[in-house]
């Protein structure tokens, strides 16, 4: 009988062995690892892929974790040759005694063979293949490598593969941060990941965990005291997403799309690590400034109402608000049921970014003791104002909403009209209302609502084009449209610097006088008569070019463009990376009718910020394979090569491995240095004395920029910079609706830019563009633009290119209106 069994076994071996898969590549196997996106400072921003896995070397896995798995799955792992014959015998006896196939005898090596090469079906043929493969693996690999592969490969539930991923998903911890009980919980999962899942089956998970702890105790891996303590530990597992250290979902999607375009679906399993140019500190500042800025705009225009209203049983509400009045023993269960009933109202309401849903339980309309609410503005803001509301959150906790967090919510009527000021809480909310709440560490809870308006922010390094931060909307989860990249909106007055730079490139100087007067155009391309006007509706007569730009005078801009010619302006716009064929070919170009994206505007203003070089924005710095090898490294053309060399501490005298360090590429200079310097000087005046004066709160002299507001305030921009950072903010409705009569760029977009730059430039020394040769500074008459005389009292200093400095005898022309709205030209001392 034994001989017959031996013959059958030998026959099976010789029949199956040639059909077994090769395991030559097992020692260098490429585990399926998700695509990961990182910031420039190495902070994880995103992860894409079905399987969550973080491969670890065996020495990186705590010894106690290894011992826990050996205790649970294969305590004789280091003794058997890949097949535990004692376990197989136990399984065979079980089959004979019960007629059922059991789990016995499946070693770690056999599980590894099954996970890599075989299905999980329970057949005798598969089991035999598994045994033969295990023996083959043990001949090829040492025990340590087998254990390492197993601990990285094994499926542990909730899309986690390997122990490192499981530690993160169940506990949000690294391997070396786990307790003994948590280690045992993870080690108990391979047997049945769903059955013993501590999140959905905590009772069964505890049984399995304690079994593992008992085996660890029996094998001497933990002592009795540790065993007794850990077996009584509570279940602390809960679902954790990947340990993201930075929220940048719009950048993540940009990176994912780009990588999948290059690598196909393999990108999701290859273990690629993508390092972006995003700076963690600046991205967090961008997130905060866009969120706060859009919420602030929305609050200025009133409250559109609660999410919904539900009817609440008065008795349930009373017991919930005053549980102390219930009988301690008899009504404890009732009180719990009451709370559960109220919490269930919010079951289908998830958080919206930083906003949380809440159910209003009660309102207090009591006015301050020292007078009527309507007459006491000081009392309105006081923290002890009794007017308030009580709300229940999804977790059952009750919170107080003070009057200071409610009084903003006057009724929305239109973007230009609000309802009456609130006098009491019940003017806006009542018990049973489901609302959004926001929480601030300083002021506490407040009523909130989801803005309908949208916004975007992009910041880039003007020297290299590296995108430092990017936000494409209010909330990515609810709107994945990336307005920073995909939305093209009219640039408004933010386009004017291109027109003025083109003018300076021609015959104009910063002191040139242009008449700010009414004008009427008959232009077929503009579909009829066009009567442009300044935002204020006023005109100011002859105006120096510098002032016209920093005051954003529309009528002057139109005259400048008409003077230099639309064709010249279109060609000149190409110096800023713009396609002339995509720009309007008429005088409306002077007022920013061109539709551009925030990233395009960032590139435009980088030319001013870096002294006249055209750079290319980019956001992927390098791509690494799973083994750390570099597949791609960005090599941007830069404005200042010496700056990059200084950052890299590069010296041409240093030669390593017979090769010089790689020199950075020089970006194309598209603006003459003196012209770039003049434009930078004028754009600094936008902040010093023009439409960007709010930015003076930053107390810096090296910042510059331009506001941009389109017709009917449909778009509001601020495009600003210093020599080290360009940042562009945009705010508007996706549906091209007006923002409101008073919502100019200075009010809607500039505060967002200020909040961002306050963080971005904190601790950074001021830095001015170097002054190129060939410029002179001259005192001029502020009204005529001519050199100042001793008799002049209204004088300013102005910068000129040496060959274009004005003289007293220089003549030019200035346009002034004649009767009938036409224009005529008269001689004037202009240049």
Image (cartoon, rainbow, N blue to C red):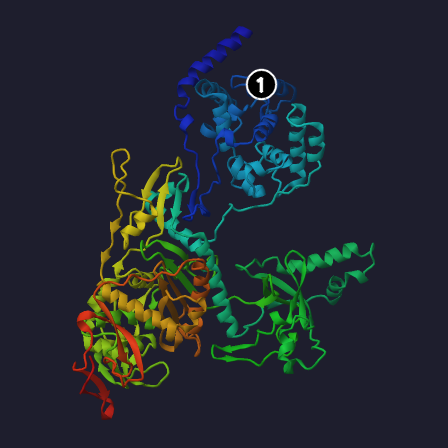
Image quadrant holding the N terminus, namely: top right
Residue at the spot 42% in from the left edge and 55% down from the top edge: 250
Q: Residues within 10 Å of mark 1 (few under 14, many from 20)?
A: some
Residue at the spot 65% in from the left edge and 26% down from the top edge: 215
Tell me where residue 318 appears, x and y as whole percent. 75, 65
| Residue for badge 1 | 88
- In the picture provided, is 9 more to the left or to the right than 522? right
Q: Is residue 233 above or below residue 495?
A: above
- In the picture provided, is 763 more to the left or to the right than 173? left
Tell me where residue 764 appears, x and y as whole percent. 42, 58
- Nearer the observer, 423 or 734: 423
Question: Is residue 824 among the parts visible in the rendering?
Answer: yes
Residue 429, located in which quarter of the rendered image? bottom right
Image quadrant holding the C terminus, namely: bottom left
- In the picture provided, is 227 more to the left or to the right than 689? right
- Nearer the observer, 822 or 2: 822
Tell me where residue 326 appears, x and y as whole percent. 81, 60
């Amino acid at each position: 009988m034994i001989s017959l069994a031996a013959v059958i076994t030998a026959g099976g071996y010789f029949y199956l062995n040639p059909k077994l898969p090769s395991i030559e590549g097992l020692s260098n196997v490429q585990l399926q690892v998700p695509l990961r996106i990182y910031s420039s400072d190495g902070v994880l921003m995103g992860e894409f892929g079905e399987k969550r896995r973080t491969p670890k070397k065996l020495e990186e896995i705590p010894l106690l974790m290894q011992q826990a798995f050996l205790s649970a799955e294969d305590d004789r792992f280091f003794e058997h040759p890949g097949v535990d014959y004692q376990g197989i015998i136990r399984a065979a006896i079980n089959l004979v005694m019960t007629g059922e196939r059991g789990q016995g005898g499946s070693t770690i090596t056999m599980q590894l063979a099954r996970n890599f090469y075989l299905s999980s079906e329970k057949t005798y043929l598969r089991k035999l293949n598994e045994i033969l493969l295990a023996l083959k693996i043990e001949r090829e690999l040492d025990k340590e490598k087998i254990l390492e592969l197993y601990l990285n490969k094994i499926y542990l539930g909730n899309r986690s593969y390997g122990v490192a991923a499981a530690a993160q998903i169940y506990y949000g911890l690294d391997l070396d941060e786990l307790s003994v009980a948590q280690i045992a919980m993870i080690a108990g999962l391979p047997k049945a990941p769903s059955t013993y899942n501590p999140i959905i089956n905590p009772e069964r998970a505890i049984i399995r965990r304690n079994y593992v702890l008992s085996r660890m105790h029996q094998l001497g891996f933990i002592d009795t005291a540790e065993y007794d303590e850990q077996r009584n530990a509570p279940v602390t597992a809960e679902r954790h997403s990947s340990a993201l250290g930075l929220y940048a979902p719009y950048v993540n999607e940009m990176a994912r799309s780009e990588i999948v375009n290059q690598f196909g679906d393999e990108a999701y399993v290859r273990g690629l690590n993508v390092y972006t140019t995003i700076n963690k500190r600046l991205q967090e500042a961008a997130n905060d400034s866009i969120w706060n800025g859009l919420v602030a705009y929305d609050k200025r225009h009133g409250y559109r109402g609660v999410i919904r209203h539900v009817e609440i049983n008065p008795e349930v509400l009373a017991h919930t608000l005053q549980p102390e009045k219930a009988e301690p023993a008899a009504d404890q269960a009732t009180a719990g049921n009451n709370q559960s009933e109220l919490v269930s109202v919010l079951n289908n309401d998830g958080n919206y970014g930083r906003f949380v849903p809440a159910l209003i339980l009660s309102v207090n309309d009591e006015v301050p003791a020292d007078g009527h609410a309507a007459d006491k503005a000081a009392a309105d803001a006081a923290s002890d104002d009794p007017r308030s509301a009580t709300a229940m959150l999804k977790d059952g906790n009750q919170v107080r909403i003070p009057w200071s967090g409610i009084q903003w919510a006057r009724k929305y009527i239109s973007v230009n009209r609000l309802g009456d000021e609130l006098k009491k809480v019940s003017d806006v909310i009542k018990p049973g209302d489901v609302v959004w709440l926001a929480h601030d560490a300083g002021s506490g809870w407040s009523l909130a609502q989801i803005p309908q308006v949208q916004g975007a922010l992009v910041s880039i390094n003007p020297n290299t084009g590296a995108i430092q931060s990017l936000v494409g909307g209010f909330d990515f989860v609810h709107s994945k449209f990336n307005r920073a990249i995909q939305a093209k909106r009219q640039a408004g007055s933010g386009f004017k610097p291109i027109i003025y730079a083109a003018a300076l490139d021609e015959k104009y100087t910063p002191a040139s006088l242009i008449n700010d007067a009414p004008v009427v155009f008959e232009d077929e391309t503009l579909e009829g008569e066009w009567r442009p006007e300044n935002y204020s509706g006023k005109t100011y007569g002859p105006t120096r070019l510098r002032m016209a730009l920093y005051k954003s005078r529309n009528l002057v801009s139109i005259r400048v463009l008409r003077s230099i010619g639309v064709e010249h302006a279109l060609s000149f716009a190409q110096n800023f990376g713009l396609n002339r064929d995509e720009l309007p070919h008429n005088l409306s170009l002077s007022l920013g009718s061109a539709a551009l994206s925030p990233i395009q505007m960032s590139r435009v203003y980088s030319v001013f910020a870096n002294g006249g070089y055209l750079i290319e924005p980019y956001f992927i710095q390098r791509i690494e394979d799973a083994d750390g090898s570099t597949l791609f490294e960005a090599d941007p053309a830069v404005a200042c090569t010496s700056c990059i060399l200084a950052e890299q501490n590069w010296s041409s005298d240093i030669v390593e491995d017979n090769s010089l360090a790689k020199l950075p590429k020089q970006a194309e200079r598209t603006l003459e240095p003196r012209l770039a310097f003049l434009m930078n000087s004028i754009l600094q005046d936008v902040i010093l004395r023009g439409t960007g004066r709010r930015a003076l709160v930053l107390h810096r002299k090296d910042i510059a920029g331009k506001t941009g507001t389109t017709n009917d305030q449909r778009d509001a921009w601020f495009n600003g910079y210093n020599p080290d950072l360009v940042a562009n903010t945009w705010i508007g409705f996706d549906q091209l609706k007006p923002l409101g009569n008073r919502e100019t760029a200075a009010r809607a977009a500039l505060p967002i830019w200020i909040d961002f730059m306050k963080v971005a430039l904190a601790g950074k020394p001021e830095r001015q563009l170097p002054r190129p040769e060939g410029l002179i500074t001259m005192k001029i008459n502020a009204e005529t633009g001519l050199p100042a005389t001793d008799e002049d009292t209204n004088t300013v200093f102005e910068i000129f290119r040496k060959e274009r400095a004005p003289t007293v005898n220089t003549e030019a022309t200035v346009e002034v209106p004649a009767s009938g709205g036409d224009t005529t030209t008269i001689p004037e001392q202009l240049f």
